Amino acid sequence: MRKNTHLFTAIYYTFLSSCIISLTLAGCGKTAKIGAQPLVDSVYITNFMQSEPAFKDELVFAKNFYRERGFKLGWFKDHEIVPQAEKMLQVVAKAAEEGLDPKDYQIINFDEKFKALKEAKKDSTKLKELEKEIDLGLSATYFNWASDYYRGLIIPKRNPEMEWDVKRNKIKLHKALMTILGERESKYPYADFSPLHPQYTNLKKALARYREVQAKGGWPNIPTGSKVKLGEASPVVPLLRKRLAEFNDNTDTVNSNSNVYDANLSTALKRFQEYNGLKPDGGLGPATIAKLNIPVQNQIKQIIINMERWRWIPKSFEQDYIIVNIPEYKLRVFEKARQVMDMKVIVGKSMHETPIFSDKMEYVVLSPYWNIPSGILKNEIAPKAMADPGFLERMDMEVVTAKGARVDPSSVDWSMAGQAGFKYIVRRRPGPKNDLGDVKFIFPNENDVYLHDTPHDELFSQTKRGFSHGCVRVERPLDLAAYLLKNVGYDRSSIMQHISTRKEKFVPLKQKLPVYLVYFTAAADEKGRVSFYDDIYQHDQKLSSMYFSKL
């Protein structure tokens, strides 16, 4: 845990702002006849960065930054501190707005450093040494802060227990600093110290608002067993008006003193239910009351750790991609960075979690076979096949070799099924009984996870949809297939025509499409209204424990 023994004070901020601005002829004084700006070298950089535990991990960024500029100082120009220094220190001082702790980045007492710089204006040797110290200090402070802000306080690569195998955020912080100092251009908003994803920005707005709620005492408690009926009065209505204010677009209703449960309040409650993964019936069932009464401090933590997850995401998504948010049970398709499709999904049950990773979709399979996974084969299929010779045929299943040759089930040693020495594949034929439905979408990966259709469409009506063995079942597979195959000569009609033949066919995509399977339990819209999703795999618990122990 990084600790800081030199805390900023209000006096320091006032002094710092004035001193940085006044490092000119009118303030800290003109430094005359002291020659060129001093240089640093690798030894100096290494010694400086290793002198503080909080800076050690950022040594590579510091070396790259100064090496690329010929070891010239970055924060001084003609012996004057550039304006970006003040802006950077102000941003760092507001780290709490990002769910970070400002004290973690206040390692150096710049109050003392700037005061000493002012007093050393007539001693060129001492002045140059201070310039080097301050320059390295500002760079180290930036890298220390930016590493957490842009890459994450808990980096998944270093913490495999996070079970997050999405493509890494490979941000080069020394390049970001060069952008801040106006030495290079970037399509990313480093110069403004802004986040890389709008979803992060929305969560940050929500964090500020939820902290305001916390400061005012939190949410009102909705008594267990409370009931409301449209058009009727209830003592719980004033509490609901206050609790649901953010979801109520009618300000007159929000401020009303009426105890009547009106249409506007009912709409607000339905919106709250939608945002929280509940059935939007406008009623106060036990699940709805439980969600309404979650303490605001718990939700603040949930917002913060989801902001952290956005730091793990690559600097930008590709123009075209598919993203599945597992706790939300939702798939979205983006084309040219614009959402063009979304649908419900079914994900892995708690004992068969859908893994969090990214890969590239390569082809679509029409009328797929379903190869029975080894666990299901051993525990469910093999015992029935041994007891009943006609079982496989009734279930529209068959046994084949690795090359696809049919095998008589009666010749199979079923006691070996599901084990390493079992040399056969047991599969279900294409058709209405097939567990994969009519289509599957393949992005080859070591998890053997893919998207696919399902014959059990009724499950999509459930609000909580953790029913699979790890793969992701999609609500509208034919729509997705038609979209993906539109550039390779297929439309919905031709797809349906082939499916009717019940013959498996692999159709390569014209261009591989990135697929992200992610895990966000909080998301906010532009107004800062938050959707909270259940932590179905308890990943929030692990991340929260690690994250807040570092603050």
Image (spheres, helix red, strand yellow):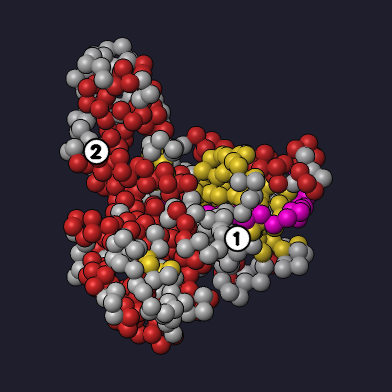
Numbered mark located on residue 213 in the image: 2
- The kind of secondary structure the magenta stretch mainly shows is strand
Q: Position of residue 67 (x, y in %)?
A: 50, 79
- Mark 1 or 2, nearer chain start: 2
Q: Position of residue 265 (x, y in %)?
A: 33, 21
**Badge 2 amino acid:** Val
Left or right for 351, reference 460:
left
**Badge 1 amino acid:** Asp
User: Would you say residue 516 sits in the magenta stretch?
Assistant: yes
Closer-to-camera residue (73/442): 73
User: Would you say residue 459 sits in the magenta stretch?
Assistant: no
> Disc 1 on helix, strand or loop?
strand
Closer-to-camera residue (371/313): 313
The part of the image, by quadrant, that contains residue 127 is: bottom left
Left or right for 389, reference 407:
left
Left or right for 334, reference 533:
right
Residue sitting at 42 percent across and 43 percent down?
202
Outermost residue toward the bottom in this view: 43
Outermost residue toward the front in this view: 33
Numbered mark located on residue 359 in the image: 1
- Which residue range is magenta in the image? 498-520
Outermost residue toward the top in this view: 231
